[in-house]
Image (cartoon, helix red, strand yellow):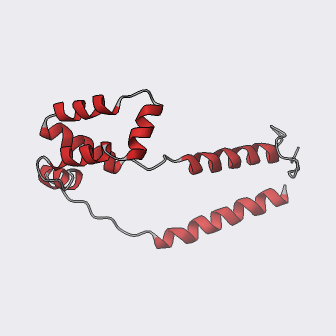
Amino acid sequence: MTRFRRTIATVVAFSLTGMGFVQGVQAAVVGTEQVAAVQAPALAAGEGRARLQSTLERADVVAALRERGVDADAARERVAALTDAEADQLAAQIDRAPAGGDVIGTIVFIFVLLLITDILGFTKVFPFTRSVR
């Protein structure tokens, strides 16, 4: 019980120490034009279609499309059928997409979760942990 109280006292002490570092925050009204300027890509009208067409010309993209059962010529025809606004929006969405996703973060999260459940005694996945139970 003494160890538990000591741990709680340490956490509270660090929390109270951190409160001295709190800074004030200012808020202001943000206009629609400012939000649109930040979210809108810096693409000239029609530049999105050219970027999409050049992307579809790359060998690695064509191979990835074939793996997924998509004909590269059909994809080029669909890009040609897009309006300029749609092509610009799609190019911007591709630019914002994370490359490869967040696989590493997911793996680390699962490892830490299993490690914690091992230490707490709910699971026995890792042989190098000892349960607190």
Q: How many marks?
A: 0
Quarter of the picture holding the C terminus: top right
Position of residue 27 in the picture relative to residue 103 (left or right): left
Q: For residue 60, which quarter of the picture?
A: top left
Residue, x 23% and y 51% (percent of image)? 39
Regarding residue 53, the answer to whether it shows in the image is yes
Position of residue 58 in the picture relative to residue 128 (left or right): left
Residue 63: image location, x then y, percent? 44, 39
Regarding residue 30, the answer to whether it shows in the image is no
Residue, x 44% and y 68% (percent of image)? 22
Q: Nearer the viewer, residue 62 or 88?
A: 62
Quarter of the picture holding the N terminus: bottom right
Residue 82 vertical position relative to residue 105 in the rendered view, above or below: above
Position of residue 101 in the picture relative to residue 27 (left or right): right
Residue 115: image location, x then y, percent? 75, 48
Q: Nearer the viewer, residue 16 or 91?
A: 91
Residue 54 vertical position relative to residue 64 in the rendered view, above or below: below
Residue 19: image location, x then y, percent? 51, 68
Residue 14: image location, x then y, percent? 62, 68
Residue, x 31% and y 42% (percent of image)? 56
Q: For residue 94, which quarter of the picture?
A: top left
Residue, x 70% and y 66% (percent of image)? 10
Residue 85 vertical position relative to residue 70 in the rendered view, above or below: below
Position of residue 104 in the picture relative to residue 55 (left or right): right
